[in-house]
Amino acid sequence: DPNSVLSLYADDAVLQSEADVFRGKSEIRKWLQVAFDQGSVLESITAIREKSSTTIAYGTGQTRRLVGAEVHLGRYLIVMEKRKRKWVIVEHASFNTH
């Protein structure tokens, strides 16, 4: 559900992928909708490094997605910030590696 995923992002979040740079929830929604329309299914996330303080956190790792019968391996970097006592994604980079 794109709306559930979108709720994890700050209103002013930035997402970068092979396709483009998406700024704000309305643009990120378009990126998510394309993935859902393609039938993209996130099979696994393998965290490589994560670190946090009381107001900022980041995580990086690898992903495995299925798009139909095709396997897409990728890398991600997510930066989160605590705003109004809620953690939200403020920066997200997601790229296919194979």
Image: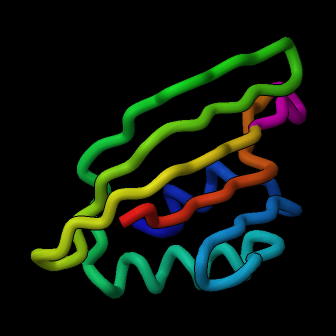
Query: Residue placed at 62% from the left, 71% from the top?
Result: 17
- Tell me where residue 96 appears, x and y as whole percent: 45, 66
- Tell me where residue 40 appears, x and y as whole percent: 30, 72
Closest to the observer, 60 or 88: 60
- Tell me where residue 89 appears, x and y as whole percent: 72, 46
Query: Residue placed at 59% from the left, 77% from the top?
Result: 18
Q: Quarter of the image containing the C terminus?
A: bottom left
**18 horizontally vs 37: left or right:** right
Closest to the observer, 62 or 23: 62
Q: Which stretch is magenta?
A: 80-85
Query: Residue placed at 59% from the left, 36% from the top?
Result: 60
Question: Is 84 colored magenta in this rendering?
Answer: yes
**56 horizontally vs 17: left or right:** right
Q: Quarter of the image containing the N terminus?
A: bottom left
Asked where in the image residue 95 lies, by quadrant, the reply is: bottom right
**75 horizontally vs 51: left or right:** left
Query: Residue placed at 62% from the left, 22% from the top?
Result: 50
Asked where in the image residue 62 lies, by quadrant, the reply is: top left
